[in-house]
Amino acid sequence: MAKISSPTETDWCIESLIAVFQKYAGKGMEFLSFKNTELANQKDPGVLDRMMKKLDTNSDGQLDFSEFLNLIGGLAMACHDSFLKAVPSQKRT
């Protein structure tokens, strides 16, 4: 019998992303509600609006799970880039 290991940090992060998506999901994710609640600390709300327009190709104001992951990935990359600029000694990878 295989030993069941404890969830990893990555497992927890994935579960958290799924839980956030499910919290706002109906037929699709209602972006405005998500943005106002989960991304309220975003320094440049215009960035979010531009990202949404690129992701929401049918202009219905909702994101499916794949589009949501693209949004989160883009935000994570932007945060990572900001962090590297703030700490110039960090090696870029």
Image (cartoon, grey):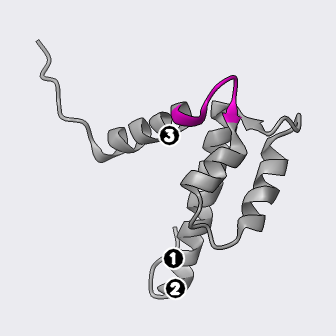
**Amino acid bearing label 2:** Ala
Of callouts 1 and 3, the N-terminal one: 3
Q: Residue at x 78, y 44 (%)?
A: 55
Reply yes or no: does residue 24 show up in magenta: yes
Query: Is 14 above or below relative to 1?
Result: below
Residue 13: in magenta span: no
- Badge 1 is on which residue? 83
Give the camera-side residue of 22 and 57.
22
Left or right, 89 with respect to 74, comes to left
Q: Residue 26 appears at what percent x and percent y?
A: 64, 25
In contact (CB < 8 Å): disc 1 and disc 2: yes
* Horizontal and vertical percent position of residue 40: 59, 62
Which residue is labeled 3 in the image?
20
Give the residue number, with chain letter if any, for mark 2: 86
For the residues labelled 3 and 2, the Cα–Cα distance comes to: 28 Å
Q: Are marks 1 and 3 in contact (CB under 8 Å)?
A: no
- Which residues lie in the magenta part? 23-29
User: What amino acid type should be assigned to the residue bearing mark 1?
Assistant: Phe
Question: Which residue is painted at 75% across and 36% down in the image?
Answer: 62
Q: Residue furthest top?
A: 1
| Mark sitting earlier along the chain (3/2) | 3
Q: Label for residue 6?
A: none
Q: Are marks 3 and 2 in contact (CB under 8 Å)?
A: no
Secondary structure of the residue carrying numbered label 3: helix
Query: Residue 18 location, x and y as percent?
Result: 48, 34
In front: label 1 or label 3: 3
* Label 2: how many Cα within 10 Å (few below 14, some 14–19, many 20+): few
Image check: 34 left or right of 61? left
Name the kind of residue labelled 3 in the image: Val
